[in-house]
Structures are given as C-alpha cells and as structure tokens.
C-alpha cells in the first residue's frame, strides 16, 4: 500500500525563507512564526499520514453505496472525519465568530495540500463544506449565518454546491431547476442536479445544499439564476433538526476515481430553500468564492502528484533491475536500484521540480488571497484573479501528468491496483474537469482575466517579473541558470499576450485558439519565477551557513533542472499561439 | 455506450495513394489492389463495429474471473472469438502451410488497428497467440510446427508469452524459473511468471505458453535464458489433447484497465516443456518477433485514440453549451454545439492530426516489415529496427494523451464510467508499459538502434528525409506549410543524434538522459514526414479531379494543423536533450 509523508520542511522553506510571510504586512501573519507553523504543519502531516492516508485505498476499493436512500461511506471514514473535526481542522481559516480558528488562508493551502495528498476523495467532504461556508459567510443574512455556520465550521453539518444539470454544465444559463417563492419568504425548489460531490453521506447530521435555480419570471439565461440554501433536514428555530426536506439522492455515479466520495444525482421535489444573497445574483455569489475553490482544486492536482512521487521514489530506490551504465553501484546486490538509470531520474526530476515549484506557486496564491481578503488589497485581488485559472488549469494538468509519470516508474506494477499507483492517476484526473474544465479556465484567463481592469493585473505581473529579473542579475550563477531563462520565458508570455491583443480584436478566435497554450505558457513562467526565488533563498541560506546545506543545495539543483528541462516548453506554446486560429477553425464540423 | 466505425477510407488512402503499395516491388503486394483491400478492410470494419466493439464495455464491467482454476471471460467473448476464427482473421498473415491466409503483414496492421480500437482487451487473446505463432514458426522444429501451428493459426489453441517474474521485468537476467532436462529431451519447468496476458481463459481448447527459463549449469544472466513451449494440456502424438500439464493460474491481477483480458500469475510446478530454438538463445528467439509485437502495441496506442476521438467528435457535435464567440451558429437551439468553441476544436484537431499521421506511420512500418520478411531487404530491416521503438513508444504515449483529450471533451461526463470514455484512457495506459516500458524503448533507440550497423539505418533515414524535402520543394504551398517545417525538424533530429555521438562517448548518461525526448522528437519528425506525404498525395488527387475533394482538402488542412501546432514540440525536445545529463544525475538518490 502506498505511504504518504507530509512535506513539512518544504512548506516551511517556502513560507518562511521564500515568501517570508512574517515580514509581510498582512494581518495575523506576524504571529505565524517558524515554530508556530511548524507545530501546525507537523500536526496536519501526522494526521494526514497516520489517519487519512491509510483510508485512501480503502475508499477506492469499497467506494460509496446508496442504501435505502442513504449514502454509506467506506470503512473508517466516519472515525477519521471525527478526528479531523475534533482537531478543529475543518474551520482552520474560518471566522472565530462561528467557531473557526481564524487563521490566515495560507495555512489552509499548506495543510490542504497534505490532507488532499493523503486522501482526495475523503477531503472533498470538508472541502465542499468550506466552499458552502464561504458563500453563506459572505452573502448570508445574520440569521442564516447564525443558523448554519457554526455547524458547518465544525462540519457537524457538511455542505455541497449544486450547479450542474444534465443539459447544462459550463453554460449555466440553460438551467431548468426552478425556485418558486412562497408566502413565508422561502422557496420551493424543483429540479435535478448532477455531479454533486459529497452530495450525501453518513458522517454528518445534516447536509446543507447550496443550489442554483431560477425564480420564474426572472431574466433569461445566466442573469436569472439565484442561489439557495436547501438543507437535507429542516432546521428549527432553536437550531434543532426537524423533518426531512423534499430532496433525495437519485443515484451515485460510477466514476474513474475518487470512489470514496459520493458523486450524487440530487432530486429536488419541491424542497424548501432559502434565498442566499440577492435574487438573480446567484452567479455573483458563486464567483466570490471561486478563487479559493479553484486554488483548492489546483492544490489537489499538486497533491496527487506529491503522493505519487513519494511512492515512486521509494520504489525506484528499492527495485533492483539492470546496472548503471556508468558502472555498478550496488555490487552486493543482483542488480542496481532503478534510480541509477537516467530515464528513471528524468521522470523523478520532472515530478520533483514540478511539485516544489507548484507548491510555492500555490502558497504565493494563498498570500494573495489573504491580502485581498483581510486587507482589501486591490493589487492582490487583481493578481489572484489573474492567476486563479493558471493555478487551477496548469497545476491539475501537470499534476495529472506527473501521476502518470510516477506510475510509469513502477513498470507493470504501476498498472496493477495492488500497488496503488493507478488510484493516484484516476483520482487526479477529475481535478482537470471539475470546478470549471481546464479549457474553460483557459477561456477565463484569455477572454476575461487578461483584459480585466484594463489589463492592470497583467501589467502588474509583467512588472513584477521584470523588476525581479533586474534586481537579481548580479549573482552570476543565479543570473545564468535562473534569471536569463526566466527573462526569456517572460518575454514570450508578453509576446503571446500582445498577439492576443492585436489579433483578438479582429477575430476573437485568434485569441481563444491559443488560450490553452497560453495557460500553460503562463504556468511555466510562474513556476520559473518561483524556482528563481527558491534558488535565491536557498543560496542565501547556504551563505548564512545555517540549516541543512544538502536541503538548500538540492533546491538549487532541482531548480536548475526545471529551468533547463521544463521551462523550454514556453517556446513551443508561443509558437502554437502565434499560428493563430486558421488551422484550428478551418474544418467544417462535418469533416472531423 | 461508445460506438466505433472502422476508418476504411483513411486506410485506403494511406495504402494506395500515399504508400502506393501495388507499385512497390514486394511479393504479394501486386494483388492488393484497391478493390481487394476495400473488401478485406470493409469486412474487418464490419466485424469490429458490430461484433467486437459492443463487447468492450461488457468486458470492462464484468472483467474476468478465476473459478476453480479456470478463467471465465466476459459474456459474449467466446461467441465473438468464434466469429473471428471462422472468418479466418486470426491467421490473416500466417503461413498457408499451417492454415494461414498468407496475406502481407500490412493488412494485419490495418485490420489490427480496427480490431484493437473496437476492443483492445479482447484482441489481446489472438494478439498474443500471433506472437507465439511467430516464435514457433521461426524457431520451431518441423515436428513442433506441425504439432502446434495449425491450431494456433486458427486460434483453436491460443498462445502466451511468459517473461516477467516478480523480481525481474526489464532485467531478464535475474530470472529464476528453471528448466531441468529430462531423458526424453523434454524439460521440467519450475517457477512463477507474472503479468501473463491472456494467461488462461475459456475460449480455446488449449493454451500454448512460451516460457523463458534457465537450464541449470548454463551461462549466468541473460545469456543463460532459453525459450520453452509449455502447453496447458499435453498434446498427444496424434494431435489429440492429453493430460493437464503441471501448471496453474495463481491469480488474476486487478488492473487499471483491459479488464476483459486475463492478466495471470502463472505457476509452473514441474511442467513439461519443449525447448524452442537453441538452448541459452531464448532472448534471440524473443527478439525475432519483437519488431512486429512492438509495432502491434504502438497500433494499440493509436487504436484507443481513434475510438476515443470518434466518440468525442459525436459528443462535440451533439452537446449544446454556450454560443460561438463569432456569432450564434445554431439559432434554433438553446445553445451551439461545443464543436464551435476554439478550444474544443484544438482538442479534436490534436487528436485527428495525431491519429491520421500515426496511422500512416504504422502502415509504413508494416511495409518495411513485409520487405524485411518476404524479401530479406536489409535496408528495410535496418529501418524498421530503428523505427520500432519510436512506433511503440511515441504512438502509445501520444495515443494515451489523446484518449485523455477525448475524455476532456466530455467534461464531467468523461469521468463517469457510463459514457465509456474513462475506459479508453484506462485501457490505453497499459500500452505505454508492456512489451518494454516506453523508457526502455527510448533506451533501445538511443543505446542500440541509433548506432546499429555503424549507424547505417539512421543515415538511411536522414537521407530519405533530405531527398524527400529536396524533391518536393517546388510546390509553393507544400513547401511552405510542409517541407520547410519538416526540414527544420529533421535538422533538429540530426543535431540531437550528433550530440549523443559527441557526448555519449565521454559519458553515456549524456545520451541516455535525452533518450526519451529523442524518441518523441523522432516520432514528431516521422509524423511530419507522413503528413507531408499525405498532403502531396491529397493535392495530386485534387489536381486529378477524381474522388471526394472534401476528403483531400480535409487531409491538407489537418496536415497543416499538425505542422503548425504539433511539430513545434521538436525544438523543446532538442533543447532538453542538449542540456545533457548534469541536472538529471546531480542529486544523490537519498535527496529525492
């Protein structure tokens, strides 16, 4: 069975040596000193490896079952969920007014990586709850907040997001679920929702569904969509649970992976719902939590890559097969461990250099969310909105590819379920799809975010990159191996953006045909930027002479690998982008 | 449920308009005129879509089961296998002396693509048998051939290949299975083999295992390995079946995919075996059929991409979601079909341009095998040996990626088993691993094939590419869109080969660290070469004014997409290769 170890040292390095969060002027950051975060991350790592990870294979094998209308979760899930609750992990960054710990969001990003790496399907139950909590926290009335949030912070009640219907996924304007107003101010919700993650289960007393629906007579399309709170069990005024609401699980979907999570068809048959936020402004209410939700999914992509990589390293050190071409390295044994072979190392270095760069990228995103959230920092808000589709799309695409690489290290054993490597790829696959398929992320990036606020966030990022390259040109080693390649890749990113501006006006297809490659070009630049920062931080540590020199040297070597071997993908993406839409759009639909 | 349609027109185009096989001076090719191959391919397409494809999902869902020592195949498999047998498809290119049809190998490649696309797990039963047939055909004594081949050609008996053991996969020198000689000339086979595809089942009267084992006292390592014929049921002198041999199925592996095929642990407990070929020359016997087997697996990679693509096209035309950014295209409907969206088209064009290029590449490989096999053509033998790791590694890697793309077109529905798209990726995944993992293919390419025969095959290929570019420089459109990019990519391929020669001598890791990227660079060049040929052939057809103009115009457009959007990957691969082994090998194994 695969194992998992929380990468506490790596997280600490990024948080303290690279992002230097205690030196940033962000509320509550000054309390996050090295010892404090070490304690939190260490405890999260312990729960991840000892409590949650051992249930990952169990969840995959047993799956969830619908029995007499109730979803049964796999053996051990409930007990582990209790431990997560009891430790206060479900409300780590939630409002203390409702029982949360009030920690900065960056800690949720850091611990979330570990929790998801240990068991993605399991962590989706509290994960979805957190999303629903955020929506109610921002848009709910005081009464709604009092009624629902304390129980959701503690995950005594869990939450869901109900958007998709059979005929509408990306295009929510096609929605048919309706919400008919009643005299008491509540609504009657009727319709069918599909792909509802954590839609029902036996680990909580109640499930609070957030449901998008249309109030009859409202505007057509997406502008007529409103958001409703629809509890599984009605909640009495005193907070106690009442009758069952008129909703049910239609079925559980059979999926490629995340078998431990109940992906439900939800039927609403005149269920009682409460308007959340303003009528017809449901999409706006959804959007407020989108940056967080999408960063969270990006971290899931990373997390599966981490879990798969750790096991691939163990296997590559254990499995004896062949001899190093440069001379035997394990003369006592019948063969050398396969980690001696260059192509096995290529696979491991691809994974390692992605993982550590992506981790830094995600944590940077966490600081931007903290700044936007607790300080109303416009620049941070603009930047994280720009980066969100990249964090989601790039990290999940690449994260998936890395799980495939890790599986490949195992050869035939990687294909056998017994070794657990197949599960990482099967589970990781969903993150490229849900919370907006990655093609939709690319569309959001190029069609919306790049030109948002007159292009200011994009200009800000380009300026950050430029200044960073200028400010770090002096150290010859850093300049040669990090700054020069980053500078080149940044220019390619800007050239692509310029191409979109110049050609997208004439024909928007010229921009959209390159959107996916732009998202990947963008992601590579961001990881290059993170690696340059990590190398500089590591070098500073080495100069100081404190800490584990091998750790810092390894960082620099891994970063050099990224810059030499992964970053060159940017030129390919640019070339594709510059080829425009002609060959993409030329064929009649009938000729595919 | 997914559907499948055999791409007969595309196969005909490659066979007759591009490869022009009847004009080639290859025995039996002159009989393969357009009508003849149309009849054969049409019939194979019919069986594929009507008989075999409908069992694909059945096989995935039901899987195989070990009941009282016998493997039960999924519902319908046996009947379909009978139809395949009755049609003579299992012996299409086999020796007529043993009941085969004696057709050229290229027809096995063409029909094999369709059969595998319809149901990869099912086709592995006759596929493995064909491999075992080939080994016995080349290395068996007359008596062995008379005893086994007729029944194997007809697939009344099926075959397997037993190489892997728990402690040995790529490194077969670590093998422990032993073969002790008996007085009657037979051997006692003892040991355990794993990952034995089609290891047992209920669709044939007997299973003929080809087993690699070591004769005690022989040379150490790989040089002491011999190949044995080990029938499940003993065969009497009159050809009738006798007692059960001392072998058994230990268990069936649970796998990520190809659930319809029985991947068995095989236990040999003093089973009777017959030496095939010379003692201690077992690897040589295996190698004789390796080009065919590996091309076959490459075609599996392609085949899954084809099946997935066809369904993605249907879905993209059916699914209504959003509006074309350039203006509504389906004003009658609530939304436009998603094929109007540039990023959906990008995914479909990626798939289409890969598939058609890969098909031509595979069929070209088929002609080289025919020339090598029936004419003893040294140049063809050298070329196909060089191209084999590319055909296997590149086509399965890219084929897998394309199934992932096709799945992505479906959004959330792609992740649900109900739509069948997950199965294509899960099934396609194995082809990157078995018959030599793709990293091993890359090692074979760079460590062995590139310098084989003093580098003559590689020089031959480079000359072919150079001459082709020179000979086709006149047509301005072809030159601009096809020849120029191909010329550039070919130069990059040669530059990479040159780098390996110059640096691999000093340190072989410099070559091996780039081997995987070289395989992909090589594959892209080959597909570019195929696309250039297809474009030229299509243009000639358009000039002739015969046939379906839309078909030929679509070929040219698709080819232009490949050259503009896919071929640029070569520069990235070259850059990685030229970065050498330093960053790949720098870390201590302990620091991963």
Image: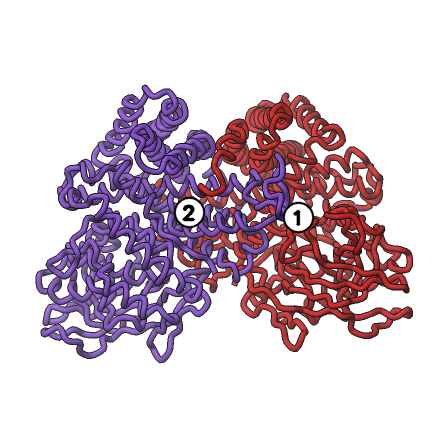
Chain colours: A purple, B red
> Residue A224's x, y, as percent?
21, 56
Residue situated in front as seen by the camera: A350 or A168: A350
Residue situated in front as seen by the camera: B288 or A56: A56
Identity of the residue drawn at 32% across and 59% down: A47
Identity of the residue drawn at 55% across and 28% down: B481
Does A552 appear above or below B419?
above
Q: Secondary structure at mark 2?
A: helix
Instruction: Answer few, some or many: residues within 10 Å of disc 1's Cα (few below 14, many 20 plus, some between 14 and 19).
Output: some
Say whether residue A128 is left or right of residue B178: left
- On whether disc 1 and disc 2 are found on a single subunit, the reply is no
The residue at which mark 2 appears reads as: A399
Say whether residue A308 is left or right of residue B373: left
Is residue A279 at all visible to an observer of this figure?
A: no
The residue at which mark 1 appears reads as: B171
| Disc 1 chain ID | B
Instruction: Answer few, some or many: residues within 10 Å of disc 2's Cα (few below 14, many 20 plus, some between 14 and 19).
Output: many
Say whether residue B223 is left or right of residue B387: right
Give the spatial CA distance, label 1 vs label 2.
30 Å
């Amino acid at each position: 069975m695969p194992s998992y170890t929380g990468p506490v040292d790596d997280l600490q390095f990024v948080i303290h040596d690279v992002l230097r969060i205690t030196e940033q002027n962000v509320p509550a950051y000054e309390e996050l000193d090295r010892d404090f975060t070490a304690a939190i991350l260490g405890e999260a790592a312990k729960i991840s490896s000892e409590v949650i990870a051992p249930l990952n294979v169990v969840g995959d094998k047993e799956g969830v079952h619908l029995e007499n209308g109730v979803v049964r979760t796999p053996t051990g899930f409930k007990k582990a969920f209790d431990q997560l609750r009891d430790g206060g992990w479900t409300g780590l960054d939630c409002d203390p007014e409702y029982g949360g710990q009030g920690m900065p969001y960056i800690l949720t990003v850091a611990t979330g990586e570990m929790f998801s790496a240990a068991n993605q399907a399991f962590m989706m139950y509290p994960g979805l709850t957190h999303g629903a909590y955020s929506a109610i926290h921002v848009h709910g009335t005081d009464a709604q907040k009092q009624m629902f949030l304390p129980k959701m912070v503690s995950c005594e009640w869990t939450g869901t997001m109900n958007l998709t219907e059979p005929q509408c996924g990306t295009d929510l304007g096609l929605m048919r679920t309706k919400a008919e107003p009643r005299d008491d101010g509540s609504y009657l919700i009727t319709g069918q929702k599909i792909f509802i993650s954590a839609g029902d289960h036996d680990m909580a007393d109640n499930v609070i569904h957030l449901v998008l629906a249309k109030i009859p007579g409202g505007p057509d399309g997406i502008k007529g969509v409103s958001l409703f709170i629809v509890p599984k069990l009605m909640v009495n005024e005193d907070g106690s649970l009442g009758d069952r609401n008129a909703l049910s699980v239609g079925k559980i979907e059979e999926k490629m992976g995340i078998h431990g999570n109940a992906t439900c068809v939800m039927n609403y048959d005149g269920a009682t719902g409460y308007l959340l936020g303003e009528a017809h402004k449901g999409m706006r209410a959804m959007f407020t939590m989108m940056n967080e939700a999408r960063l969270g999914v990006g971290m899931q992509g990373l997390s599966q890559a981490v879990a798969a990589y750790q096991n691939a390293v163990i296997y590559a050190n254990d499995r004896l097969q062949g001899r190093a071409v440069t001379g035997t390295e394990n003369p006592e044994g019948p063969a050398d461990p396969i980690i001696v072979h260059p192509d096995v190392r290529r696979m491991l270095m691809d994974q390692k250099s992605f993982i550590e760069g992506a981790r830094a990228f995600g944590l940077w995103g966490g600081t931007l969310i903290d700044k936007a959230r607790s300080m109303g920092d416009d620049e941070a808000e603009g930047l994280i909105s720009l980066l969100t589709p990249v964090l989601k799309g790039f990290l999940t695409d690449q994260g998936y590819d890395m799980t495939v690489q890790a599986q490949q290290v195992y050869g035939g054993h990687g294909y056998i379920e017994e070794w657990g490597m197949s599960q990482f790829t099967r589970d990781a696959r969903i993150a490229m799809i849900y919370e907006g398929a990655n093609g939709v992320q690319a569309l959001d990036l190029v069609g919306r975010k790049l030109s948002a606020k007159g292009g200011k966030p994009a200009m800000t990022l380009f300026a950050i990159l430029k200044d960073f390259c200028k400010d770090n040109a002096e150290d010859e080693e850093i300049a040669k191996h990090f700054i020069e390649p980053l500078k080149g890749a940044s220019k390619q990113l800007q050239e692509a953006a310029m191409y979109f501006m110049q050609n997208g006006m004439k024909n928007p297809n010229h921009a959209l045909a390159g959107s996916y490659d732009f998202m990947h070009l963008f992601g590579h630049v961001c990881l290059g930027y993170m690696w340059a920062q990590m190398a500089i931080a590591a070098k500073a540590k080495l100069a100081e002479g404190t800490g584990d020199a091998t750790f810092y040297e390894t960082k620099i070597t891994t970063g050099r690998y990224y810059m030499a071997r992964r970053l060159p993908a940017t030129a390919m993406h640019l070339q594709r982008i510059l080829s425009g839409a002609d060959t993409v759009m030329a064929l009649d639909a009938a000729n595919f």
